[in-house]
Structure formats: structure tokens, C-alpha cells
Amino acid sequence: MEISQARDLAIDLMDRHGLTEGGWRFRFIRSRRILGQCRKERREICLSVFFTALNDEGRIEQTILHEIAHALAGCENGHGPAWKTQAVRLGVRPRSVARNVRMPQGRYKAHCPKCGDVGFAHRRPKYLGQAQYKCKICRSTITWLVRVESGNASG
Ligand SMILES: [Zn+2]
Ligand SMILES: [Zn+2]
């Protein structure tokens, strides 16, 4: 989704659910790991620019509403009953976003030759290029390598 459209959508939803009135602001964050965030101290609803750029409007709207529900329920209460009540009211579909979300993959990659599991990491593994790790699924020995970019964007 376009970044500017996502910002408009977020602000519109925040207006509609009373957050703007309550002093909340919207901002983008440059996170490759998290989709969105509710920052109580700063009264900010945040959205990852990477997540926004790589995903469709439906997922982005759900993520914004998920964070708005945190703001209304109290961010410190996690996904407890207060959050659930708000989430239902706002039309957040449980686990609708986490599935099939597209996020940038890390620079490092490990491929298990035995079970085929593939892992990505953003931070440089300590023993890069050495057979020093175990596959989390089958416990075979795996090696982290610098990922070679392939031609297509899907990876
Ligand atoms: Zn949450
Ligand atoms: Zn394995």
C-alpha cells in the first residue's frame, strides 16, 4: 500500500475512534520485525514503513485497528479481556494479519539440508559461514550464510 494512503487511513481511523481527540498521533517506524505499535507514554500509534509498503490495505487497516484497540484498552494490558472487547467492537479479526504477512527478510540465511527449513536473520550470526548451529526443527547441523539476492522480489 502507498505510504501516504496508509497515513491517511490511520489518521482517519484514529479520528473516528476518538484517539486524535485524546491527543494521540500517528507515525511511521522503520522496523523490519514489528508491524505496528502502540506507545502509551508518547501517545503514538505506529506502523512499520516496510510492512506498509509490502502489504495490502486490508492487512494494514487490521493492524491499525489492532493498535487502536491497544490504545483504548490501555497498552499495558496486552491482549487481555479489555483489548479483546475493544478489538471486537472495532472489527479486528483475530490473527487475520499475522498470517501471510510480507516483511523484508534478513540479510542472513540458513537452509537446513535435511528438513528444508529456511531461516532469515537481520543481525550477523556470530559464527557466520561455520557449521556451528542446529536446525530448530530437526537438530541437524546448519550454517548461516550471507543471503544471495535472487532476481524476483518474492524470495
Ligand atoms: Zn497487539
Ligand atoms: Zn532441519
Image: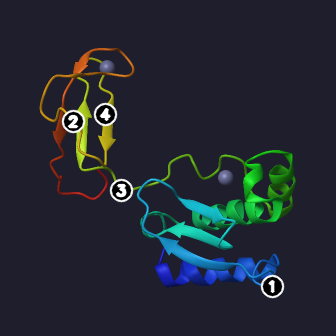
Residue underneath mark 1: 21
Mark 1 and mark 3: Cα distance apart in space:
34 Å
Q: Position of residue 3 (x, y in %)?
A: 48, 79
Task: Looking at the image, tell me whether mark 1 or mark 3 is earlier in sequence order.
Answer: 1
Residue that numbered label 3 is attached to: 104
Which label sits on residue 3?
none
- Camera-side residue of 102 and 41: 41
Q: Residue at the spot x=80%, y=45% of the render?
A: 80
Instruction: Report whether 95 appears left or right of 21.
Output: left
Rendered image quadrant of residue 117: top left
Between marks 2 and 3 in the image, the one whose residue lies nearer the viewer: 2
Between disc 1 and disc 2, the foreground one is 2
Q: List the residue tagged with mark 4.
A: 118
Q: Is residue 37 above or below residue 8?
A: above
For mark 2, what is the residue? Answer: 126
**Tag 2 and tag 4, C-beta contact below 8 Å:** no
